[in-house]
């Protein structure tokens, strides 16, 4: 998204995270990110969200979180993150356009 940094926050076991990191250029696609298996915390726990805030060097209210599990979206909202439930790419695009983060 132009003018914004992209980060990831994934509940992924360490062996899968290692495979993904070794196979794809995540450091080119994202500014930073957290894999739960590497930090030994997972969504929807508050600690992984706090870790993400520090790693992303962002205030909670400046973060927009997309996730396909309602409980994770609720956890982000409870920390004052902006968040919405991901159901499919088309609806996510509409949401990002409505927030003026993507052009129509």
Image (cartoon, helix red, strand yellow):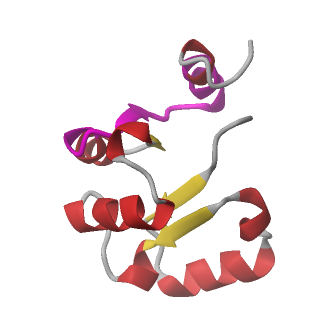
Q: Is residue 81 magenta?
A: yes
Q: Residue at x 74, y 35 (%)?
A: 2
Left or right: residue 45 versus residue 101 is: left
Identify which residue, 4 or 12, lies in the foreground.
Answer: 4
* x, y percent for residue 66: 47, 40
Q: Is residue 71 magenta?
A: no
What's the magenta region? 77-95
* x, y percent for residue 101: 63, 25
- Is 38 drawn above or below residue 90 in the view shown? below
The quarter in which the C terminus is drawn is: top right
- Is 11 drawn above or below residue 88 in the view shown? below
Q: Residue at x 68, y 59 (%)?
A: 30
Q: Residue at x 61, y 17 (%)?
A: 100
* x, y percent for residue 99: 54, 18
* x, y percent for residue 70: 31, 39
Identify which residue, 14 or 34, lies in the foreground.
Answer: 34
Left or right: residue 78 versus residue 39 is: left
Left or right: residue 90 versus residue 68 is: right
Identify which residue, 12 or 57, lies in the foreground.
Answer: 57
Left or right: residue 71 versus residue 65 is: left
Q: Residue at x 58, y 31 (%)?
A: 88
């Amino acid at each position: 998204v132009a003018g914004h940094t992209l980060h990831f926050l994934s509940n992924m076991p360490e062996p899968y995270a290692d495979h993904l990191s070794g196979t794809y250029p995540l450091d080119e696609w994202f500014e930073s990110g957290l894999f739960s298996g590497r930090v030994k915390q997972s969504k929807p726990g508050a600690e992984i969200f706090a870790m993400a805030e520090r790693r992303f060097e962002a205030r909670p209210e400046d973060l927009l979180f997309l996730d396909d599990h309602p409980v994770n979206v609720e956890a982000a909202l409870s920390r004052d993150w902006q968040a919405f439930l991901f159901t499919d790419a088309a609806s996510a695009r509409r949401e990002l356009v409505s927030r003026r983060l993507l052009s129509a």
